[in-house]
Amino acid sequence: MPGIHEDTLIALDLETTGLSANNDHIIEVGAVKFVGDRQIDTLSILVNPQRKLSNFIVQMTGITQADVDSAPDWEDVQEVVSEFIAGTPIIGHNVGFDASFLRSHGVKPDGLYDTMSMAEIALPHGPEYSLVRLADRFGFSHDAPHRALSDALVTKDLFIHLLGILESFDRPVLEQLRFLGEKVQTPLGRIAKRILESETSSICETNKSLLAIDLKELGQRLRSVKNTPKVEPHKYNQASIDTENISASTRSIFGVNGALEDTLIGYESRPEQLEMAVAVSDSIEAREHLIVEAGTGVGKSLGYLVPSILYAIRHDKKVLVSTNTINLQEQLITSDIKISKNAVKAIGDKSERLRTSNLKGRNNYLCFKRWQHAIQSADPSDIESKLLSKILVWLRETETGDKNELALGRLTPLFSRYSAQGAIGCPSNDGPCFLRKARNQANSSNLVVINHALLMSDIAMGGGLLPEHDVLIIDEAHHLEPAATNQLGFSVNQTQLESELRQLVGSKGMLSRLASMVTKNETTPLSTHLNITAIAVDAVETAIKNVAVMFDLISTVCKEFNKGTQQQADLRLTESVRAQPIWSDLEIAWENANTALLEVLQSVGDLCDQVQATKDGSAEGIISDSLAVVDSIQGSVTSLREAIPEPTDESVYWFQSRSRNRGIYVNGAPLDVSNQLRQWLFDQDKTVIMTGATVAYDDSFDRYRNSIGLSDSNELILGSPFDYATNTLIAVPEDMPAPGEPGFANATADTLIEIARASCGRVLVLFTSISALDNARKAITSVLSQSGIRVIAQGSDGSPARIMRMLADDQPTIALGTSSLWEGVDLHGASLDVLVMTKLPFPVPTDPVVAARSELHEDGFNEYIVPEAVQRFRQGFGRLIRSKSDRGVFVILDKRIVTKRYGVIFQKSLPKCTVRRLARERLNQLLISWRDGTLT
């Protein structure tokens, strides 16, 4: 059969006035007709939408109001468009969007191929699937992004390129892609079928199972161990290297003319880094705990890695390094450890003795068996088919099974169905197991990188998740208490619990699948099996009703206590709340839900036992999935019992009511985590090193030590090597309305416009709430677009990492961010010109955990709220200057920093900088003078 390359196809793109096919209009059509790589014809038409274009559309597309006002109406071009595409399959990037507009405008496309879906599966690693990013990645000419014909031409090139990638897959992989695609009738299934029918795909006879995976080759990948290059002697080699103390070796690495200067291009010895590294060395050798605050630019990662590596390889000891974010975890593995290892090698140490591994929580690893069972089981949904296909392509090459290798996007929540989290009998010794490999590597390594979530999970479970170790390094140590609070608490989500119950029932539900397995057993009467199944179904249906009643009452309680508020707030379950008459009704509803849920657990467990008794190997998947759901429901029951009828004095509990789709959450968290941390971290026979840029408060670690249960440790506070006094200007407009006063939001928007215009560069604005960010974005976008300044916002324009990548582009940009942009994500190859903090980052006083912990102090505001805010304030300031060559302005729009008594504490927390207090009207000229270097 002829291949797709011989078909006549049309790549099409539409520009529109908005996203709604029912309410918005087409303003431009671009299409290219082609066969293979031969272009036949093109179509490019502007359309008058009979409405005013938004500034956003004008800015994005470059299409002006004058352009469309002089263009023909849709009725005048509809026939031309229809005739051009008639009878020809349409290719688009997110083609469903274009197809919906064609249909709403009276044009019916015949067949659809989506290059975005093709890319998401053919390129499982991503990292991004936008047309602009893919065009840049593959070097396609894209002269006018977001103009219809230019986008259509790139879509054509992308389709041909992706088709070539798919054609390179082995036939078994294509067969499985066809199978998964045809189940839900996706275009990718049709493409795989056409490739197979044309016999252009690679033919590779391998030991592949029905899953299209070469199990033998996968097993070899899971057993592989990378070899370390042989060490060559270096000029720093010392005869007594194995007996020399680590501190002396550390000095020879970090000192002037040391090993790091010799092995790392551009490295300059920093006294602060040397002092930190020696302190780490001394504490490790003395087996003493250490807290180090290292200012921005010290290079704390190398400061603790080098002495840790020296200790690990000389004494064959195990060191664990814990980070708060997976991003830093990956950075240590891919970059910083290699740099440290090269430096250690340079002084003659046997760096091949270093065995490193990266260990994460179970939910990060694919469970091969769960994925296998999912493919072989009931019909998947469209989104499940896409993820299963993506994993299939990824499995051809992954060595880790780590989901961080995948660009999951909106598929991220679904990955948990196939992860090792909740998998029964995991890690498994039977067949491929990525979690087993990760843990085996960690056990055999002497330097293991983990994250705080896994560290706290190990504590919550009483140990067993992490390998035994001698030294624990905690980076981003200011996140230790919040991480412990999160992991040692719980959150029961209404939507998730109800979804788990519904997974059990229905024609394709787990109970139905279990019943079909059980009826194969001829030794037990069919009526017995049917009775067990009926009991289980009745129990689930009763539980669904009773759980709904319980959460409806919780919603009523929330509404009752949140009367008069503009938005529903978290409701802390205090004694006064529990004393209300409605609480008795809630406890009765809980008892009914609890009884029904326990009946579900018993019934499903009995049914699983019946299936296991059949010893049918094909039932392993459904049993595993069912028991995973049972385990999750059991956890919810335990948490709900604690939160509603059986609270403890050691925890705080609250209801969280959000949007209808997200449902209601029942939460609990420990008031104080210091006892658990002291018991499991500091009272053990190991050294713990804690470090971060904002650990101390008022030049003291007392507050931090109390919060984590640390009674005794060595301490060190190191400033930054950066010249803030010369390179940083702090500006405080004193005539701003205070936050909460009338006019603050408008004054903030007006000031941001002036800052963006004056800087003509990269501006990052930090907000303390999403609503404030959204209001500012709406107020400034259209105004700044007229000045050629791009406005991008966290959330609406992408993730924090994507926002920072866009900010690094060579285009005047103002980026708006909230919590996750206050720290952690750097610009690459660029620096900020201006950092704006709209409000001092006080924690929300009504937040249940904040309120409860504040009450533990005599003066909750000054002893708890202010220190929390100062720490966050320092983290935000740290976003501005990231290297010695950086130069920038820090604008604080919250005048409380100069008008309130506590403002002095915020001021003292920063390094010495050039400071200007001024009227708002003078801010523009101040920024221009700073930018031009004329400020006096």
Image: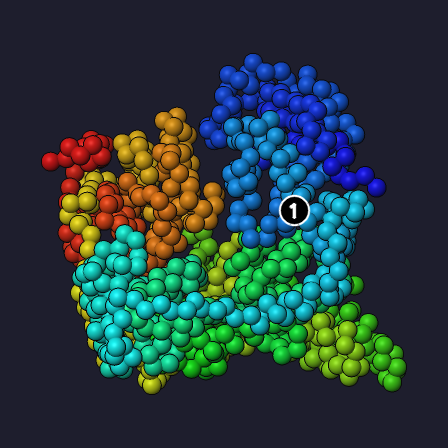
**Residue 197 in view in this figure:** yes
- What x and y, as percent, mark residue 172? 74, 57
Q: Is residue 282 above or below residue 116?
A: below
Which corner quadrant of the image does residue 406 belong to? Answer: bottom right
Q: Is residue 868 above or below residue 804?
A: below
Q: Is residue 649 above or below residue 292?
A: below
437 displayed left or right of 847: right
Query: Tag count in the figure?
Result: 1
Mark 1 lies on a secondary structure that is helix
- What x and y, as percent, mark residue 380? 72, 58
Mark 1 lies on residue: 165
Q: Nearer the viewer, residue 734 or 822?
A: 822
Q: Quadrant of the C terminus?
A: top left
The residue at the point 55 percent across, 16 percent down is 69
**Residue 906 in view in this figure:** no
- What x and y, as percent, mark residue 752? 31, 37
388 displayed left or right of 494: right
Disc 1 residue type (three-letter): Ile
Which corner quadrant of the image does residue 534 belong to? Answer: bottom right
Are there few (<14), some (14-19), or many (20+) residues within 10 Å of tag 1?
some
The residue at the point 51 percent across, 28 percent down is 143
The residue at the point 68 percent across, 16 percent down is 76
